[in-house]
């Protein structure tokens, strides 16, 4: 069947499934994902998290851990 570019929709299914990915630099991670075909969701719930969709319309969320020492 091959790769299909998702058709933008006004409503994406709501689901609790998705991949959360801790990153060191949120803006760089988002730009890298976009260069690989990801799209940024219209609604962003927090300043340190970005909701994106891969080309197959699967949700994933890169985030920066803030306020915690390691």
Image: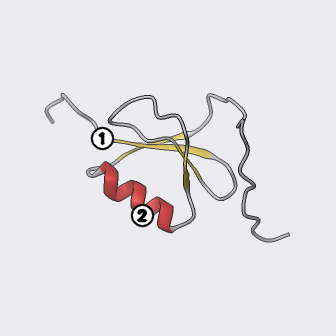
Distance from label 2 to label 1 (Cα)? Answer: 15 Å
Instruction: Report x, y in % for residue 35.
Output: 48, 68
Instruction: Report x, y in % for residue 11.
Output: 72, 35
Confirm or deny contact between disc 2 and disc 1 (CB under 8 A).
no
Q: Which residue is mark 2?
A: 32
Q: Looking at the image, which residue is at 71% across and 51% down?
A: 8
Q: Residue furthest right?
A: 1
Q: 1 above or below 14?
A: below
Is 20 placed left or right of 55 in the picture? left
Is 40 placed left or right of 62 in the picture? right
Which is nearer the N-term, disc 2 or disc 1?
2
Q: Secondary structure at mark 2?
A: helix
> Would you identify the image quadrant in which residue 55 lies?
bottom right
Q: Looking at the image, which residue is at 70% across and 55% down?
A: 56
Disc marking residue 64 = 1
Instruction: Report x, y in % for residue 24.
Output: 26, 50
- Tell which of 60 and 13 is nearer to you: 13
Q: 58 above or below 12?
A: below
Is 32 placed left or right of 41 in the picture? left
Disc marking residue 36 = none
Instruction: Report x, y in % for residue 61.
Output: 47, 42
- Tell which of 70 and 66 is nearer to you: 66
Q: Residue furthest left?
A: 69
Q: 65 above or below 9?
A: above
Q: Quadrant of the N terminus?
A: bottom right
Q: Looking at the image, which residue is at 65% across and 47% down?
A: 58
Q: Quadrant of the C terminus?
A: top left
């Amino acid at each position: 069947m091959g790769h299909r570019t998702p058709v933008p929709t006004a409503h994406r299914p709501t689901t609790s499934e998705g991949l959360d990915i801790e990153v060191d630099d949120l803006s760089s991670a988002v730009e890298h994902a976009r260069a690989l075909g990801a799209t940024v969701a219209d609604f962003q719930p927090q300043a340190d998290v970005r909701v994106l969709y891969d080309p197959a319309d699967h949700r994933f969320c890169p985030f920066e851990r803030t306020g915690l020492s390691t």
